[in-house]
Amino acid sequence: MKKKVLVNDLMQQGYVYFLTEPIGKNFDPDFKPELTPKEMLELGVFGGKYMTDCKDEFPREWFINAKLSSSKKDISLNYFQVDASMSLGYWRKKGWIYHEDPRGWFQWYARYYMGRRIPPEDERQIKRWKAIQRHISAIEKNCRRGDLECRKKQRQAVLHWAYDSRKI
């Protein structure tokens, strides 16, 4: 199985990649996200302003109940209704953006979930995903289990990394 995907959206024109794994399967054994991209979009992440121009690349069902904003970031769409994102410019300045995924980690995750594999980049992104554990530890240390009002910004940030912070 090797399906070709051609991307033409506002941030990428003529980008081609291949899906070599079945959707949602055969993840690196160290990578165990708690939320799918569809679940993340439905919960409300990134102020609803993520991937609004590239719906054709991903399954239609991901967007049926997604909380999206057609014009600009809308924090009220985030699950915890707080801003827990840094700008794309900030991420670029830090060197965290991989050229093939100009929107960042979530774009990488969505493509990985779909079945794209780029071993060196997958390893780098999974390492970054695992580093979010420090935020989970801070929530666990400072909040009563299930107190969703405690550390809302950290909880929202954790959602952005496919961890279900509602369960902490």
Image: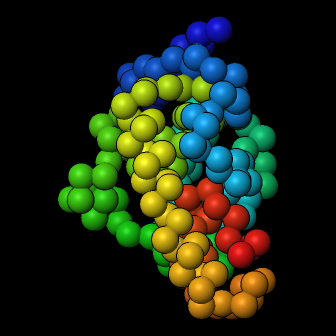
Q: How is the image coloured?
A: rainbow
Give how far across and how far down residue 20 sits, in percent.
Answer: 58, 17
Q: Determine whether, in the image, residue 100 is placed left or right of residue 107.
A: left
Is 48 in front, or is 110? 110
Q: Residue furthest top?
A: 1
Identify the residue shown where x is 64% and y is 61%.
163
Q: Quadrant of residue 48?
A: bottom right
Residue 5 percent coordinates (x, y): 53, 20
Left/right of residue 168 with respect to residue 158 in the rendered view: right
On screen, residue 117 above or below 130: above
- Residue displayed at 66% across by 90% down: 143
Query: In the image, residue 158 lies at what x, y percent?
Result: 57, 68
Left or right of 73? Residue 76 is right
Q: Would you place residue 91 above or below residue 119 in this image? A: below
Q: Residue at 45% across / 36% down in the picture?
A: 122
Q: Looking at the image, is 133 positioned above or below residue 17?
A: below
Q: Which image quarter holds the N terminus?
A: top right
Pick whichever, 24 or 89, lies toward us: 24
The residue lying toward the viewer, choosing from 65 and 26, is 26
Residue 107: horizontal and vertical position, in percent?
Answer: 49, 44
Nearest to the observer: residue 5 or residue 54: 5
Q: How many marks?
A: 0
Q: Residue furthest left?
A: 93
Residue 60 lies in what quarter of the image?
Answer: top right
The quarter of the image holding the C terminus is bottom right
Q: 62 above or below 166?
A: above
The reply to whether residue 82 is in sight is no
- At 21% from the left edge and 59% from the top edge, which residue is drawn? 93
